[in-house]
Image (cartoon, rainbow, N blue to C red):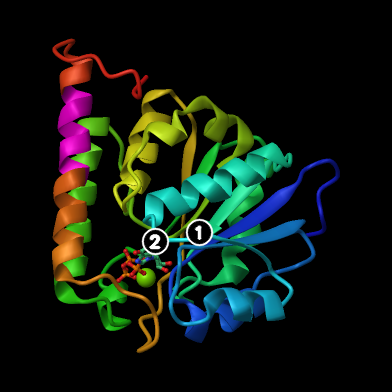
Amino acid sequence: MKKVEGKKVWVFLPAYNARETLKKTYQNIPRDLVHEILLVDDASQDGTPELARSLSIRTVVHERNLGYGANQKTGFRIALKEGADIIVLLHPDYQYDPQMIPELIGSILEDKADVVLCSRMRGREALRRGMPYYKFIGNIFLTRVENFFLGTSFSELHTGLRAYSRVALEAIPLEKNSDDFVFDSEMVVELLTRGFRFAEIYSPARYLPDSSSIGFFRSVVYGVETLLVLFKYFFHRIGLVKDERFG
Ligand SMILES: Nc1nc2c(ncn2[C@@H]2O[C@H](COP(=O)(O)OP(=O)(O)OP(=O)(O)O)[C@@H](O)[C@H]2O)c(=O)[nH]1
Ligand SMILES: [Mg+2]
């Protein structure tokens, strides 16, 4: 696929201590349809920004560690300000296949979707590839609860490879969202409840020794916070506590 006339595709890498995996991730990004690659570094201690700059990746650095959600706020703010039409979020820990990007953005380019998620969850493949058992079970459980509350049928809502259209990102109050990991779940609920069209593709993730993987405690915090977002949405829907973040 060649660069699509008039559509600016950005790839955004939210980075934290990604030095071991950044180069591999970056080199696998198909360049012919991507206009800009932006890395936001959240005060890594392993030299991630220095490596990024040596690879000629445009790099923005947080002075101190602000969190995964705050990292995305910075990235989306810059991309939107500079006219990106489609923004691909890609974790730089080389767990996701950058070669999936053309397929990922295809339905946005064709105006058939506003948000596309690259699911890692189909059958037990993720387990075979090394996803820890508690993450596998947690992912299935959380996605099922989300599907129940949102009336959807996704196989996974927690992936680190997704694409958003500009229109979708501009419609939601990004800055009001969490600075932590639950930012991703807030976005999904805000976009779905505003009626944006979601699509899902599939590509299993890699679990290599140097890929970033948050531990058990932070995973549980993420899970509980995601459930809280759903409860808030439910109360909003039944009119008990209105929350302007949801449509
Ligand atoms: N800004 C910021 N990003 C972080 C922090 N910790 C991890 N990340 C990044 O957030 C992304 C997701 O974190 P991971 O540790 O890979 O966790 P995960 O993808 O939810 O879980 P896995 O499926 O095990 O990979 C990675 O790209 C990390 O670089 C942090 O403290 N701050
Ligand atoms: Mg990871």
The extreme right residue here reads 5
Question: Residue 72 placed where, x, y %?
Answer: 48, 50
Label 1 near ligand 1 (CB < 8 Å)? yes
Quadrant location, the C terminus: top left
Vertical comparison of 191 with 145: above or below: above
Query: SS of the residue at dot 2?
Result: loop
Vertical comparison of 118 with 21: above or below: above
Label 2 near ligand 1 (CB < 8 Å)? yes
Q: Which residue is mark 2?
A: 65
Left or right: residue 220 compared with residue 1: left
Q: Is residue 183 visible?
A: yes
Asked if disc 1 and disc 2 are in contact, CB closer than 8 Å, the reply is: yes
- Dot 2 amino acid type: Asn
Q: Residue at x 32, y 42 (%)?
A: 178
Q: Magenta stretch?
A: 226-234
Q: Residue at x 49, y 33 (%)?
A: 197
Q: Which residue is mark 1?
A: 62
